[in-house]
Amino acid sequence: MNGEPTRLVDDESVRDELRDRLTREAATPPYTYDLEKGLRRLRAAIAAESPEEGRESPPSEPPAGVASR
Amino acid sequence: MGTAAEAETSGTLDAEALFRAHAPFVAGFLMRLGVRQSDLDDLMQEVFMVAHRRGGFVPGPARPTTWLARIAIRIAMAHRRTRTRQWGELDEEAVAAASGSDPNPQAQAETTESLSIVQQALESLDVERRALFVLFEIEEESCDEIAAGLGIPVGTVYSRLHAARRDFQKAYSRLSGRVQAPAHQVGAMR
C-alpha cells in the first residue's frame, strides 16, 4: 500500500487535458454489449457442458443424435 | 444484481453470478485491451466459461474483477495471436457507439475525439502494460488488488505500471500534438 502511485487523473503535474480525457474514458463504457443476450448464451453453454462434467449419462445412451448431425 | 451481490457477500460466485455482477467490467476491459466489438460476444463467453470451469470465484486476496481480469488477459492474448492484422487498429465503430449517447453534437464530437486519442495511446502499449494501465488508471483498482488478481508481486505491478504510464504519456503527447484543435475550433477556422 505504501508505494501506491498517484493516479494520473489526480496528479496535478499531469496536463489537465489528459486528465480530462482519462476521466471521460473512465466514464464512457467502450462497448455496446447486450448483457441479457450474453447471459442467455452463457447459460446455454454451461448447460451444454454439464453432462460431460457430471458424467452421469448412461453408457447405453450415447449422444448419437447430436453426434450424427 | 441483488442476487449477485448477496452471493458475493456469502462467498463463492458461480459463473452466472459473476456475469451478472461483472460482465460490464469484463466487456469494457476486453475492449480496452484491443478486442474489437465484432469479437466481443465470443470472448466474453470464453472468459466466463473459463470462470465456470474453474468453479467460479472463491474469496481470497483477489477481487472478482481482478480475478476475471487475469482470465480476460490470457484470452485476449490468445485471441491476439490469431488476429494480428486487426489488432492495434482503432475500432472506430466502437468509439462512435460509445460516444453516441451524448445529445449535444459538439460534445459528442469532442468525446469521440477524446476516446479515440486515449484508445490509440492505449494501443501503443503491449497487452500486459495496457492491462495494468487500464486496471489502475481507468478501473481504479489498487496495486495490491491487481497484484493479487494477476498473481504477480506488487513490486512487479509498480514497475510495469510505471513503464505503462511512461509509454502511454509518450504516445498521448504524440497523438494529441497531431490533433491539437478541438473539432468546433477547426470548424470555425475552416
Image (cartoon, grey):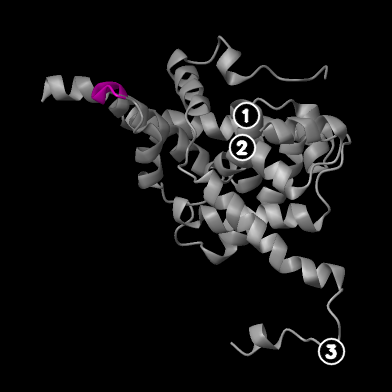
Q: Does the CB distance between marks 2 and 3 fall below 8 Å?
A: no
Q: Are marks 2 and 3 on the same chain?
A: no
Q: Are marks 1 and 3 on the same chain?
A: no
Q: Are marks 1 and 2 on the same chain?
A: yes
Q: Residue furthest right?
A: B60
Q: Does the CB distance between marks 1 and 2 fall below 8 Å?
A: yes
Number of numbered discs on residues: 3
In the rendered image, residue B60, in percent from the top left (x then y), is placed at 89, 36
Instruction: State the separation of the CA atoms marked 1 and 3.
Output: 51 Å
User: SS of the residue at dot 2?
Assistant: helix
In the rendered image, residue B71, in percent from the top left (x then y), is placed at 72, 50
Name the residue carrying label 3.
A60
| Marks 2, 3: nearer the viewer | 3
Q: In terms of depth relative to the viewer, which is nearer, A33 or B7?
A: B7
In the rendered image, residue B42, in percent from the top left (x then y), is placed at 56, 59
Instruction: State the separation of the CA atoms marked 2 and 3.
Output: 44 Å
Q: Residue at x 21, y 21 (%)?
A: B184
Q: Residues within 10 Å of mark 3 (few under 14, many from 20)?
A: few
Q: In terms of depth relative to the viewer, which is nearer, B169 or B45?
A: B45
Name the residue carrying label 2.
B25
